[in-house]
Structure formats: structure tokens, C-alpha cells
Amino acid sequence: MNYAREMTECGKNGYKCKHNIRRKYKKLYDKNRQEKLAEIKRELSKPPFLRNKYKTKREFESAINY
């Protein structure tokens, strides 16, 4: 189930239900963001000539701000 569908179905149940769904999806977003930052750190720990990604500063900044 996705966020929009859960919020629609939950709309009748009031604020508490919506708040719980927001919290759940925020945790998922934060977890995905932490995984992405860990991947970036691993890639940046390699020397520049061995990197597959983030060879330029622009690529690195766009990955952080995704």
C-alpha cells in the first residue's frame, strides 16, 4: 500500500491515524536517506580514478540532494 491510498482510507478515522501513517513513512524516508548517504560515503572512500559514481562535485551534490 502506498502513502496516498493509506491516507485516503484513513481519512475517516481522524487525526491520530493520519499522524501514525505520516510517522511510518517518515521513518521509511529517513532509512532510505541513511542508506543513500552510506553508499555515497563508501564510494567517496575510494580513490577518484576507481570510482564508478560521483567523480565530479556536481554528481556528488545532486546525489545528496536527490
Image (cartoon, rainbow, N blue to C red):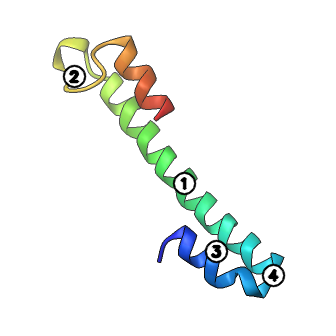
Residue 38 versus residue 6 in the image, above or below:
above
Badge 1 is on which residue? 29
| Amino acid type, residue under disc 2 in the picture | Arg
The crowd level at tag 4 (other Cα within 10 Å; few <14, some 14-19, many 20+) is few
Q: Mark 3 points at which residue?
A: 7
Question: How far apart are the alpha carbons under marks 3 and 4?
Answer: 10 Å
Location of residue 27 by image quarter: bottom right
Residue at screen point 39% across, 21% down: 60
Q: Which mark is residue 12?
A: none
Position of 27 relative to 60 (above/below): below
User: Residue type at mark 1?
Assistant: Tyr
Q: Which secondary structure lies at badge 4?
A: loop
Decide: few, some or many residues near mark 1? Use Cα within 10 Å; few <14, some 14-19, many ≥20. Answer: few
Left or right side of 7 for 36: left
Left or right of 40? Residue 34 is right
Estimate the x, y position of residue 46 in percent, counting from the top left.
27, 22
Mark 4 residue type:
Gly
Disc 1 vs disc 4: Cβ atoms closer than 8 Å?
no
Mark 2 = which residue? 51
User: Where's residue 14, x and y in %?
Assistant: 81, 81
Judge whether 22 appears above or below 43 on screen.
below
Foreground mark, 1 or 3? 3
